[in-house]
Image (cartoon, rainbow, N blue to C red):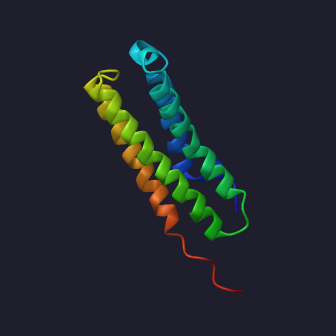
Amino acid sequence: MGDFKRLAAWREGNDLAREVHAAFSVRDAREYPGLRAQVLRAAASIPANLAEGCAKRSRRDLARFAEMAYASAKEVECHLILARDVRILPTEQFSALAKRTDLVAKLCYGLTRIRPSAPG
């Protein structure tokens, strides 16, 4: 389909993954290793799914992988809420990450709405 690095959703998702990794690499995250592992895995899967979708042959396949990336963004959102609630993330950091996660989710959702190419 194309170069995944040109997708705004991939760029934003990759930035989100880096920010989540930085947020969970220190502090009390050591007390919740399962939560840390899950949120890092979910965040990393967003750009990975988009890259894989771009390697497929059709827009329908890209949309399917974008749907998986969207689901991962929602998983990240859920884990961020828990991290805030158990006081791993300060409210300000949670708010910034939640806002970025919402943007990424919207961009991924937009890619799920891609219409197949007209037969040529």
| Residue 33 higher or lower than 106, as above or below | above
How far from the left and from the top, in percent, is residue 86?
30, 24
| Residue 112 higher or lower than 68, as above or below | below
Residue in the image at 35% along x and 28% along y: 83
How far from the left and from the top, in percent, is residue 37?
52, 28
Q: Residue furthest bottom?
A: 120
How far from the left and from the top, in percent, is residue 90?
29, 22
Where, by quadrant of the figure, is residue 32 drawn? top left
| Residue 26 higher or lower than 62, as above or below | above
State the quadrant of the C terminus: bottom right
Residue in the image at 52% along x and 59% along y: 67
**Nearer to me, 53 or 80:** 80
Number of marks: 0
Left/right of residue 59 with respect to residue 21 in the rendered view: right
Left/right of residue 46 with respect to residue 89 in the rendered view: right
Residue in the image at 45% along x and 60% along y: 109
State the quadrant of the N terminus: bottom right
Left/right of residue 109 with respect to residue 46 in the rendered view: left
Left/right of residue 43 with respect to residue 78 in the rendered view: right
